[in-house]
Image (cartoon, rainbow, N blue to C red):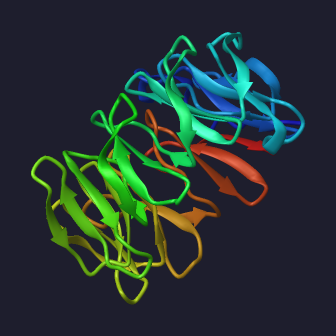
Amino acid sequence: MRKIYFLIVFSIIICSCLQAQSLIPFIEKNRFGFLHKTNGRTVIPPQFIFASAFKDSMAVAAIGNYIVSSQYGFINEKGKWIITPQFNSADQFFEGKARVQKNGKWGYINKKGVIIIQPQFSQCHNFSEGLAPASLKNNLWGLIDSSGKFVLQPIYYNISSVFAGVVCTQQNMTDKWEIITIKNKTNIKTSFTRMNGFADSVSAARDTSNKWGFVDLSGQWIIPPTYTNAGNFSEGLVAVQKDYKSWGFINKKGEWIIAPQFDRMGSFNNGLAMMEMGNDIVYINKEGTILYRFQR
């Protein structure tokens, strides 16, 4: 039985979520449904083996008994299928395109469900600034444009999404990462053993002692590497982990905004973040207040 606790005044919830999507996913008896974020009322009953958050009034949803054998499609905010379940996997829409998997290969569809880039990639990611990371059968990565053609050839062991015209790459598994400016193909060599890619003009980076910090677009540290794990900045905050223990959130000054207390990380979207605490899933706001708590 789902347990929801309202821990702040109703009017405060409304103010904090005014510009947000109105529905958020929850899990009950291993099935996903959606509740209204301002009053906790169930709007779409739990029925999906998987469901994403809503984006542009659409959410990925899957039907079946097991994730690996389920069929994925897209629903509207009434829970009605607008793109019927037909894919082996799918992701949200970015720049009008969603990556989907069919017969073991990845491609892209438009919002009508029409395939616009044929499934041909062993892996691919979402579009950003007109480009998307993609990999062929050799598992080497490059960047494709909206026609599916490689504009940065697939020669990299690792690659990030594009932000502000730059992309983070790793040529070979043991190489240090580079920051490449796509337009003029200039690159900044770094000493980092891992980079998450830029978001909010900042990227998490790992040094040679396996500690994570954050760098700017020039590769300079703005938050020293002191963390054992790190996510990506979203809405001014990022989840980090100290000493492989609980997760909390810091700002771009490296100040703790939400103290470490969560077992698994999430990121903020429209003012809320979904986190795990023991056997519970919780939604928190940017002050760390738990708005909703429910059992899986």
Residue at image position (29%, 33%) is: 130
Q: Which of the 4 image quarters holds residue 40?
A: top right
Measured as percent of width and height from the top left, residue 36 is found at: 63, 21
State left or right for residue 166 relative to residue 275: left
Quadrant assignment for the N terminus: top right
Please give left or right for residue 118 compared with residue 282 in the image. Answer: left
Residue 19, how many percent across, how many down?
40, 21
Q: Residue at x 65, y 63 (%)?
A: 263
Task: Give the image location of residue 68, x and y in percent.
Answer: 80, 44
Q: Nearer the viewer, residue 128 or 142?
A: 142
Question: Could you say which quadrant of the image residue 180 lies in?
Answer: bottom left
Residue 215 can be seen, yes or no = no
Q: Residue at x 55, y 30 (%)?
A: 9
Residue 192's place in the image compared with 51, above or below, is below
Asked if 246 appears above or below 276 in the picture, the reply is below
Q: Is residue 265 something that shows in the picture? A: yes
Question: In the rendered view, would you say 197 is above or below 34?
Answer: below
Q: Is residue 126 above or below residue 80?
A: below
Residue closer to the observer: 28 or 201: 201
Judged from this view, the residue extending furthest toward the bottom is 209
Position of 39 with respect to 285 (left or right) is right
Quadrant of the snapshot with the C terminus: top right
